[in-house]
Amino acid sequence: MTASTTIPHREKLLREGMRRLYVHGFHGTTIDAILEGAGVPKGSFYHHFGSKEGFAKQVLARYVQFQLDQLGEWSGRADLTTPAVLSGYFRAMADRFIASGHRDACLAGKLATELCADHEVFRAQLAEDLGVWKGRIAELLRQGQRRGDVRADQPAETLADAVLALLQGAFVVALASRDDALLASVGTALELLVAPPG
């Protein structure tokens, strides 16, 4: 038995679907293409996900959980200040984007741009997922405010809104520009945004 045959169908579909959604977006990704790439029968798709929209929401949930896990790992770095944690977290995202050949930016941003104007159910789900992501950033910033290495003249939630917007916007611009120096400057800007003034 090979390793590939031990991977459950649901997992194969999620992996293949995430890859295709990154490359082709929601509308450019067909269920048949996901099934062919994953090498599983059509019934498995509908058994696990019900619909293409349900599938995309599961892929998005997995992506957001990955981001929360990555943020958690960086947050556990006792050797770094809070601004350096945020900058390091972003730079790790940027490194993955560059390593992908400037293809795999932020999947949440990609799907938001494509779907949120016309799919209210998906928009609501994405807003909820982004709210959890923002909440984790806000908690990190609150801890930094208590330690004194994050500016206290703005609420942590306000700073978290700005951080998340900067993360998302950076990858939108980077997808078009392919400018790695821009990504490096955003890492610096994140530190300046949240560090105490002076």
Image (cartoon, rainbow, N blue to C red):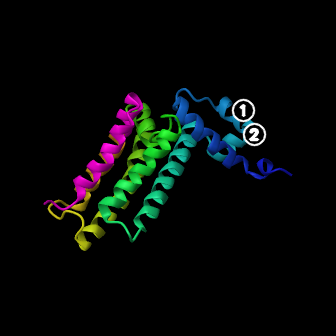
Tell how many labels.
2
Residue 60 makes an appearance in the image: yes
Image location (x, y in percent) of residue 75? 40, 65
Residue 140, x across and y down, in percent: 33, 64
Magenta span: chief secondary structure: helix
As rendered, which of 84 and 50 lies closer to the eye?
A: 84
Q: Is residue 83 left or right of residue 57?
A: left
Residue sitting farthest toward the top: 28
Q: Toward the viewer: 86 or 181?
A: 181
The residue singled out by tag 1 in the image is 36
Instruction: Answer left or right for 132 relative to 149.
Output: right
- Observer able to see residue 51: no
Q: Is residue 12 left or right of residue 197?
A: right
Q: Amino acid at mark 2?
A: Val
Q: Residue at x 31, y 45 (%)?
A: 186
Image vertical order of residue 5 relative to residue 178, above or below: below
Q: CA distance from mark 2 to mark 1?
A: 7 Å
- Image height check: is 137 above or below 110? below
- For the residue carrying disc 2, how many other residues have a C-alpha within 10 Å: few (<14), some (14-19), or many (20+)? some
> What amino acid is found at the position of numbered circle 1 in the picture?
Glu
Which span of residues is magenta-colored? Answer: 171-198
Q: Are marks 2 and 1 in contact (CB under 8 Å)?
A: no
Q: Is residue 148 magenta?
A: no
Q: Secondary structure at mark 2?
A: loop
